[in-house]
């Protein structure tokens, strides 16, 4: 015998919003679809921005990249606000547990002076690098308001990077007993240590880029690929091999998040490149110039933090990634 | 080594405030180019007091908790045909206005804060703006999801996005956000965070949410309460920005005063539709517009402006006109929509006898004297099968874009249309009030560009000649979304679901 | 003097918080409205973590107010151990 709860059967008049039905047909839509597609204003704006009178408030021409339909750049993770915060809350919960355990067990005390020095000079200044990444992704958001699919994803990336900056700051506090001294020292490293000046110059340069897709390439593709390999693979390994494995509990959030975010970045890049030869050429030219800058910027850092093989390995990882996207050399 | 205990303020400063740095390799002004063009002087960003010291990890945690609860209720609402529990199907027309006018504006607000969140020189202000930006994204998406179920069963929700960019009464709200977004970063945040989110928020939010609560709309009420806690953060940002700007430099005071005068007025004007919603569209009414204005502005706003007196800020003068308009606003607005109901994407109707008596009671000085007669006549015409609709199109105010139905309440002549004009570059522009004219006269180059829906219709930019062409341009379902509630498909379906003849 | 006000969603957790507010702010007035509990006080109002924890019977983080908060008026002072609303004038 089966139990069937009788519910009142009332036929809906329609299954979803009209603009969703025009895209996907008159059937029930997902939350991602209803939240994302075709709501952003495209026409009939009332005033020109005083701060940018050559463009409309929402304007596709703030980049030289051209798409027939910008919504082709949908997020493979299908993050709308609710899905995004719930995912991050899960990661946050684990991270919080890790930080609490690290502090409760005073795992910082176990670290060798070598490891502590490595962290203070090479890891803590990342909080400033992440700050730049927050601003760059916010620049992308400010410019992509014409297409919610891109807008929300770059915004989430920007907020994630602020989260990273705050977690790196907490690592410092975990190591300096909450005095904040390690963070003040990290700032000095960032401002004055020759190993960091190339990176700082690179970050400052990205912050004056106008074309938001160029910012996207310079930050989320070229720079992040190289930094992720240097830090989340190579330094990660070094720490594991040198008695710093407890620290990996505290960087787990950043590592996990980076891998997931890369799926989205790759998807955006792939789709844009496939759209047209013009897009592909433009992206190639951006990658070409920014990788040269990145090479110059990272040589001192990679050499000082790891060794002379580190940066070539990171570039190999970037090449492999670009190859998969269809942007191989 | 025992770790030092860090208090919230110090922890937040270490985690957030110190992330920024002075540039050496590029000109920082090139990365932050918009800080000075409004004439605002910031001497020391360090004086910024973070209103809520929310780090990202805490943000994700608490917002995720709110989302879990909220979406559980949306699911339950849909699974249980919650739309059948509302007081009456006429109520749904109130939230049609909300989705078409307000929800896309939440997205526009998100856009404005994203831009501001990139461009302020101070880290504290940037983070607060960024958080508000993502909050507004939340609001626009949770509203779309809340209304998703209603859209399946009632007409008038399905083309909300298309309509927001085209329809005559919705341009009022779109132009508000276009206006503040096209302004500089400090005017933007004074307009939205202070004037709108602090001073006026209770006059938008509370009416819609209370209206929902009193009329059995569980989805909207739950959205409202869930969003309100975000609004508390937005309000405090509004208060902080105003104090910060006024304390930074005395030269900021007159600039801020002018912005307060302008934005209180523009914000008030877009609330016209809320006034009519409260007084005419809720089958179960909870408060009159007049009462709401007295409680949320005259009392609460009064205390606030008293607090600001020490900076040299005065209550905007328009407050006096608003006080006089409060006995008339909702009646004039409703009549406008009733009589142009053939071109509105929601239904309108004449109030029944009980509702008219409520209006007499709430508006003892004005309803019976000026407005009851007209509504009773309209009801009579309906009975005779001649339901009244205006032919022709209304003149719109160049600034607020509302049809010019406002009358000279400021001069105690409520039966005289309030009409002002300016000539600029040999062209004549029309306004509903002194304040709208002043706003134009202060920045004519900006306001001449307004995409006024009625002008655009006459210029042939909205489908062509004739209302039928315009309705096509609007994607407004004729005989479905528009016209009187009586005889509408909404009414027919409601009666069928309720088993009523 | 002006009143400060805090409004919380009417649920299980909020009721403990309101009890703590009443204990620490004897002149506060509590209004029960549809779905909200609104608490008003002249000049200032303070929520103390210790008192809330006594009523709740478990640890409580002041910042978690964000989940139940509906509205408030007054200047905010936020700390690990308390949450305070105040008008200066």
Image (cartoon, grey):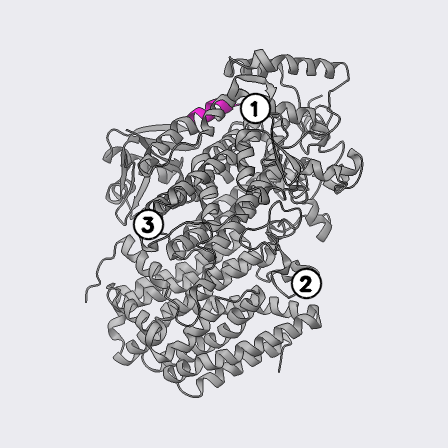
Q: Does the CB distance between marks 3 and 1 fall below 8 Å?
A: no
Q: How far separated are the C-alphas under marks 3 and 1? A: 40 Å
Q: Is residue B444 visible?
A: yes
Residue placed furthest toward the front:
B426
Q: Quadrant of residue B250?
A: top left
Residues flagged by tags 2 and 1 on a common chain: no
User: Residue at the spot x=34%, y=58% of the render?
Assistant: B17
Residue B479 lies, with reference to residue A134, above or below; the image says above
- Residue labelled with disc 3: B49
Crowd class of label 1 (few under 14; some 14 to 19; many from 20; radius 10 Å): many
| Residue indicated by mark 2 | A67
| Residue B168 pos. (x, y %) | 67, 36
Q: Where is residue B301, by image quadrant?
A: top left
- Residue B417 drawn above or below residue A183: above
Secondary structure of the residue carrying tag 2 is loop
Q: Residue at x 64, y 66 (%)?
A: A65
**Residue lying at 44% horizontally and 29% vertically, measured from the top left:** B317
Does label 2 lie on the same chain as label 3?
A: no
Please, what secondary structure does the residue beneath circle 3 have? loop
Residue bearing the label numbered 1: B330
Q: If the image is split into quadrants, where does the N terminus of chain B sit? A: bottom left
Question: Which of B179 and A14 lies nearest the eye of the viewer?
Answer: B179
User: Horizontal and vertical percent for residue A184?
Assistant: 28, 67
**Circle on res. C27:** none
Q: B21 left or right of A283?
A: left
- Asked whether the residues under the numbered discs 2 and 1 touch, taking CB atoms below 8 Å apart as contact, a structural biologist would say no
């Amino acid at each position: 015998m089966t139990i069937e709860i009788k519910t009142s059967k009332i036929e809906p008049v329609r299954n979803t919003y009209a603009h969703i039905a025009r895209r996907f047909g008159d059937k029930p839509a997902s939350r991602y679809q209803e939240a994302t597609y075709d709501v952003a204003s495209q026409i009939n704006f009332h005033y020109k921005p005083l701060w940018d009178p050559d463009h409309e408030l929402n304007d596709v021409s703030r980049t030289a990249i051209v798409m027939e339909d910008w919504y082709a750049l949908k997020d493979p993770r299908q993050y709308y606000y609710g899905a995004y915060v719930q995912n991050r809350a899960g990661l946050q919960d684990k991270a919080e547990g890790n930080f609490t355990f690290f502090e409760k067990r005073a795992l910082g005390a176990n670290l060798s002076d070598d490891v502590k020095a490595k962290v203070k000079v090479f890891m803590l200044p990342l909080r400033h690098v992440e700050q730049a990444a927050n601003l760059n992704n916010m620049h992308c958001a400010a410019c992509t308001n014409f297409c919610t699919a891109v807008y929300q994803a770059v915004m989430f990336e920007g907020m994630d990077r602020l989260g990273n900056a705050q977690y790196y700051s907490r690592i410092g506090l975990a190591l300096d007993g909450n005095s904040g001294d390690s963070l003040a020292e990290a700032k000095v490293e960032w401002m004055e240590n020759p190993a960091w000046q190339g990176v700082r110059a690179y970050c400052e340069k990205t912050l004056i880029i106008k074309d938001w897709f160029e910012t996207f390439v310079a930050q989320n593709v070229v720079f992040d690929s190289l930094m992720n390999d240097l830090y989340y693979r190579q330094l990660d390994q070094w720490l594991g091999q040198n008695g710093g494995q407890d620290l990996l509990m505290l960087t787990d959030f950043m590592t996990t998040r980076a891998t997931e975010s890369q799926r989205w970045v790759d998807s955006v890049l792939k789709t844009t490149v496939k759209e047209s030869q013009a897009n592909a050429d433009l992206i190639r030219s951006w990658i070409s110039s920014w990788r040269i800058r990145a090479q110059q910027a990272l040589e001192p850092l990679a050499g000082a933090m790891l060794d002379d093989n580190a940066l070539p390995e990171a570039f190999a990882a970037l090449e492999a990634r670009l190859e998969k996207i269809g942007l191989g050399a | 080594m025992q770790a030092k205990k860090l208090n919230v303020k110090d922890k937040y400063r270490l985690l957030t405030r110190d992330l920024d740095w002075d540039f050496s390799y590029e000109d920082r002004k090139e990365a932050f180019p918009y800080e000075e063009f409004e004439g605002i002087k910031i001497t020391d960003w360090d004086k910024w007091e973070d209103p809520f010291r929310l780090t990202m990890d805490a943000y994700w945690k608490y917002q995720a908790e709110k989302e879990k609860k909220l979406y559980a209720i949306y699911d339950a609402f849909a699974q249980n045909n919650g739309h059948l529990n509302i007081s009456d199907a006429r109520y749904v027309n109130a939230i049609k206005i909300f989705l078409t006018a307000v929800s896309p504006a939440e997205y526009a607000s998100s856009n404005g804060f994203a831009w501001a969140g990139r461009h302020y020189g101070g880290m504290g202000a940037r983070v607060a703006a960024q958080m508000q930006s993502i909050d507004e994204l939340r609001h626009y998406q949770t509203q779309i999801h809340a209304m998703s179920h209603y859209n399946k069963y009632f007409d008038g929700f399905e083309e909300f996005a298309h309509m927001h960019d085209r329809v005559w009464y919705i341009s009022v709200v779109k132009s508000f956000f276009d206006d503040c977004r096209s302004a500089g970063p400090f005017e933007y945040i004074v307009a939205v965070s202070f004037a709108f989110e602090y001073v006026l928020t209770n006059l938008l939010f509370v009416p819609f949410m209370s209206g929902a609560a009193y009329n059995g709309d569980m989805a909207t009420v739950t959205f409202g309460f869930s969003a309100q806690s975000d609004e508390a953060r937005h309000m405090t940002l509004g208060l902080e920005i105003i104090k910060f700007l006024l304390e930074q430099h005395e030269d900021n005071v007159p600039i801020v005063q002018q912005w307060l005068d302008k934005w209180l007025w523009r914000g008030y004007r877009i609330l016209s539709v809320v006034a009519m919603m409260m007084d005419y569209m809720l089958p179960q009414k909870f408060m009159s517009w007049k009462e709401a204005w007295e409680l949320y502005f005259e009392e609460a706003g009064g205390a606030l402006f008293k607090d600001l007196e020490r900076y040299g800020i005065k209550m905007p003068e328009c407050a006096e006109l608003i006080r006089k308009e409060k006995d008339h606003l909702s009646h004039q607005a409703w009549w406008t929509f009733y009589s142009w109901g053939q071109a509105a994407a929601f239904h309108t109707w004449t109030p029944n006898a009980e509702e008219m008596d409520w209006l007499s009671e709430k508006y003892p000085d004005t309803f019976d004297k000026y407005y009851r007669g007209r509504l009773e006549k309209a009801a009579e015409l309906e009975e005779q099968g001649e339901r009244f609709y205006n032919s022709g199109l209304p003149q719109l105010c160049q600034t607020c874009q509302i049809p010019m139905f406002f009358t000279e309440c400021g001069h105690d002549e409520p039966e005289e249309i309030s009409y002002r004009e300016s000539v600029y570059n040999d062209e004549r522009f029309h306004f509903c009030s002194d304040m709208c004219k002043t706003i134009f006269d202060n920045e004519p180059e900006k306001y001449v560009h307004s995409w006024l829906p009625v002008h655009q219709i006459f210029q042939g930019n909205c489908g062509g000649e004739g209302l039928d062409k315009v309705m096509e341009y609007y994607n407004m379902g004729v005989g479905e979304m528009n016209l009187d509630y009586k005889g509408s498909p909404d009414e027919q379906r409601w009666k069928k679901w309720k088993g009523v003849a | 003097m002006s009143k400060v006000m805090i409004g919380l969603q009417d649920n299980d957790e909020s009721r403990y918080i309101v009890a703590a507010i009443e204990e620490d702010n004897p002149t506060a007035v509590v209004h029960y409205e549809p779905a909200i509990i609104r608490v008003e006080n002249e000049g200032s109002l303070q929520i103390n973590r210790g008192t809330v924890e006594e009523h709740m019977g478990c640890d409580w983080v002041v910042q978690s107010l964000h989940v139940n908060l509906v509205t408030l008026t007054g200047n905010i002072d936020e700390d690990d151990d308390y949450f305070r609303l105040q008008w200066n004038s």
